[in-house]
Amino acid sequence: MTDTAPTIVNRTLRRLPNATYRPREYLTEAEVDRLIETAKRRGRNGVRDAAAILLAYRHGLRAQELCQLRWSQIDLRYGRLHVNRVKGGQEAVHPLHGPELRALRPLQGNSPYVFVTEAGTPVTTAWFLRMIQRTGKAAKLPFPAHPHMLRHSTGYKLANDGQDTRSLAHYLGHRNLQSTARYTALAQDRFAKFWKD
């Protein structure tokens, strides 16, 4: 007699490398601007969504850091943001400039959280992921976008602006300089002064 019981095979699903899904892990400054402008025009919460993208980009915030951001961390009068890092990162106080201040002021309400849903509850990382994906598609970005790309974009932009690795590490809350070195490796002007003809 043959055994007719189904055969169960355990398989480990492996995620493909990021390069399979998109050509790079950061957005250019122009692409971030396009994302923000598209967010402003999308739906009832365009002001909130655009502000979330701007703050995540300007301050290298992880999705969880953005969603947990409280008004008690923001000083609109003196233009300061106290960044509480997750994953054991170093806390820091960042300056808030005009565009960020203008984006934040309309969001002030009764909630202790900066970014809230229409029901008044804090937004979630799942919301931020969906919002970035949908806004990226609406902005016609050449590849799928995800929230952590904004953090990488911060590092890439500041490295290209000539910020030193140690300052960049402190700004992003990295405890290990090797985490930051990836941005300076991508800096387009890194080799600009090597040959002078």
Image: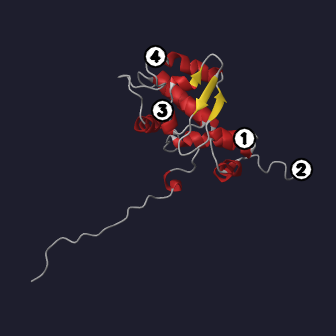
Mark 2 to mark 3: distance in Å?
Answer: 49 Å
Q: Pick whichever of labels 2 and 1 is earlier in the sequence.
A: 1
Would you say 146 lies left or right of 195 here?
left
Task: Give the residue number, with chain letter if any, for mark 3.
Answer: 68
Residue designated by label 4: 109
Q: Nearer the viewer, residue 154 or 111?
A: 111
- At mark 3, the secondary structure is loop
Q: Which residue, given by chain and number where applicable, does mark 2 sit on?
A: 196
In the image, what residue type sits under mark 2? Lys
x and y percentages locating residue 44 in the rendered image: 41, 21
Q: Are marks 4 and 3 in contact (CB under 8 Å)?
A: no
**Nearest-to-viewer mark from 4 and 2:** 4
Q: At which x and y percent is residue 8?
A: 24, 69
Residue under circle 1?
167
Is residue 179 depicted above or below 37 in this figure? below
Is tag 1's residue or tag 3's residue first in the polypeptide sequence?
3
Question: In the rendered picture of this protein, how many numbered marks are placed on residues?
Answer: 4
Helix, strand or loop under label 2: loop
Residues 41 and 44: in front is 44
